[in-house]
Amino acid sequence: MPRASNLPPTWPGGPPVRGLAKEELPEVVAAYAAAARRVREAGFDLVEIHGGMAYLLMQFLSPRTNRRDDEYGGPLENRARFCLEVLRAVKQAVGADFPVGYRFLADEWLPDGFKLEEALVFARMLAAEGVAYLSVMGGCYDSMALPEVAERSARPAYMVDLAAAVKRAVPEVPVIAAGRLATPEIAGRVLAEEKADLVGLARVILADGDWVRKARRGEPVVTCDPACHVCEKRVSRALPAICPRWPRERQRKWRELVRRAK
């Protein structure tokens, strides 16, 4: 499993991990660009580069996972180099009139991980490259299991302070806030207080596909249960997501549809 650096397996008994050789990096950058080009050709309106969680770009950016001793390791400007090369290649592949956003991890919430202080500097680097927006998040796969992070992630709007800090650092770039914005009231407050320019909704929309229409009409929405991880567990097993908040008949029909598609 190629990664940013030579590190132990991600989990006990997991596949062996090896650091990408410098000579391999242009091919990886080209693969990002080719994928983005396919996104445009498929008819989408924009493309977002995923620089969060513990995926490859974050592995290069974080001092926790980047142990390289070449020009891609060490100080932040080196650790950010690969990320910026990917952004430039993607922007060139899709053209100047096609927005390229970035899923932006502002703090890994780990003692030896990527911190907000460096994230704000990196945000300015992305802004200088003309990124269309920053979709801000906190935490990663390795921190989500920590009790204090699990407790934090169950609270409403638990990532918003990170988004607000990024927005202050790069006011010229639209910033998206996410993380337990369960109700229109919570989401509206984030925007009214100018902590972000937009809100991102994922499990919220899965729980209630009419969330936006109900918000416009001032109707109650079906909220995602912070203690429920059914959708997440199913996706991790390569199964289609199902929400227990759906009516039972909808769940039954969805399971049947998935069964027939196999």
Image (cartoon, rainbow, N blue to C red):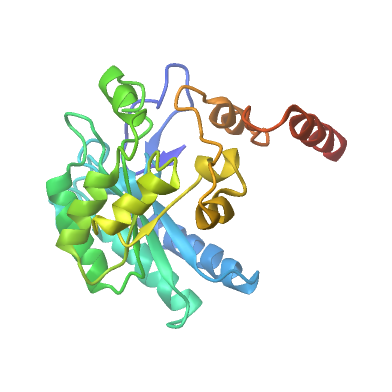
Q: Can the viewer see residue 72 in this picture?
A: no
Q: Nearer the viewer, residue 213 or 133?
A: 213
Does residue 188 appear to the left or right of 258 in the view shown? Answer: left
Q: Residue at x 60, y 67 (%)?
A: 38
The residue sitting at the front extreme is 218
x, y (%) of residue 240? 68, 36
Q: Decide if residue 239 is on the left or right side of residue 199.
A: right
Left or right: residue 133 compared with residue 253? left
* Residue 234 x, y percent position in the rendering: 62, 29
User: Vertical placement of 45 versus 62: above or below?
Assistant: below
24 w.r.t. 151: above or below: below
From the top left corner, tell me how far across and down residue 166 is, in percent. Answer: 21, 56
Task: Classify residue 175 by image quadrant.
Answer: bottom left
Task: Please identify the quarter of the rendering in which residue 246 is found.
Answer: top right
Q: Quadrant of the C terminus?
A: top right
Q: How many marks?
A: 0
The residue located at (15%, 58%) in the rendering is 121
In the image, taking residue 67 as reference, residue 89 lies left or right, namely right
Residue in front for this viewpoint, 83 or 137: 137
Image coords of residue 211 (percent x, y): 55, 48
Give the camera-side residue of 43 and 257.
257
Residue 47 visible to an observer of this rendering: yes
